[in-house]
Image: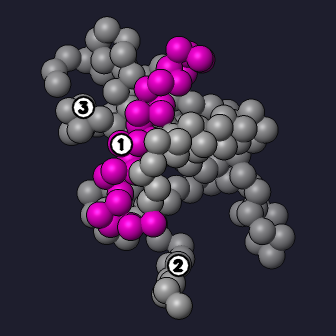
Amino acid sequence: MTGALAIREAILPDDEPYFRRFIDGLQDFEFPMEPNRRRDATVAADYLAVLMDGVATKDGKIFVLADEAGTPVGWAVGMIEQDDVFVSDDWRTYGLIAELYIDPAARGQRGGTRLIAACEAHFRARGVTLSALGVLWGNDNARGLYGSLGYAPTSLRMRRRL
């Protein structure tokens, strides 16, 4: 894909079919790294409903990476979260980048960096000074990008099947 990519806010409900495609795309991308990912026909609609509720109730915003024609080729979803009560007050409120996905053909053009910057600007505008995101351990490219932007690991979740 060539041409300029632009960041814009979501246009609802027009962009929702793209969001469902992004969710399905991320599920497919992550499945080899994390076999618990649903890949059924309703996962995108189910998860989009959860995300839309979070955006509505947690001062969230959806940013779209669009091609020259305005067609969405990626997105990021940011919302304001509250950490657990055992976290000190000055660390408790944070901006969560809950979703980040870019179509394979649009990758490598700094779209991820720009989507993260848009979420961070949203957080700063609301007085939030801490940003967080999640990444699968096996996603080396994403871990590299996030690290280059100053994100650092804070914990490691471990599990085993019984």
- Give residue 82's quadrant in the image: bottom right
Which numbered circle lies on residue 157?
2
Mark before the other along the chain sequence, 1 or 3: 1
Residue 9 shows in this picture: no
**Residue at the disc numbered 1:** 25
Please identify, in this view, whether the residue under mark 1 or under mark 3 is nearer the observer: 1
Which numbered circle lies on residue 106?
3
- Image location (x, y in percent) of residue 35: 38, 67
- Image location (x, y in percent) of residue 84: 78, 68
Quick one: 68 or 132, which is closer to the camera? 68
- The answer to whether residue 88 is left or right of residue 31 is right
Q: Is residue 28 magenta?
A: yes
How many numbered callouts? 3
Residue type (three-letter) at the residue carrying disc 3: Ala
Q: Secondary structure at mark 1?
A: helix
Residue 30 shows in this picture: yes
- Give residue 73's quadrant in the image: top left
Counting other residues with Cα less than 10 Å from the Cα at mark 1, is it few (<14), some (14-19), or many (20 or more)? some
Which numbered circle lies on residue 42?
none
Magenta-colored span: 10-36
Residue drawn at x 68%, y 53% as measured from the top left: 94
- Image location (x, y in percent) of residue 9: 54, 21
- The answer to whether residue 127 is left or right of residue 64 is right
Q: CA distance from mark 1 to mark 3?
A: 13 Å
Quick one: 31 or 89, which is closer to the camera? 31
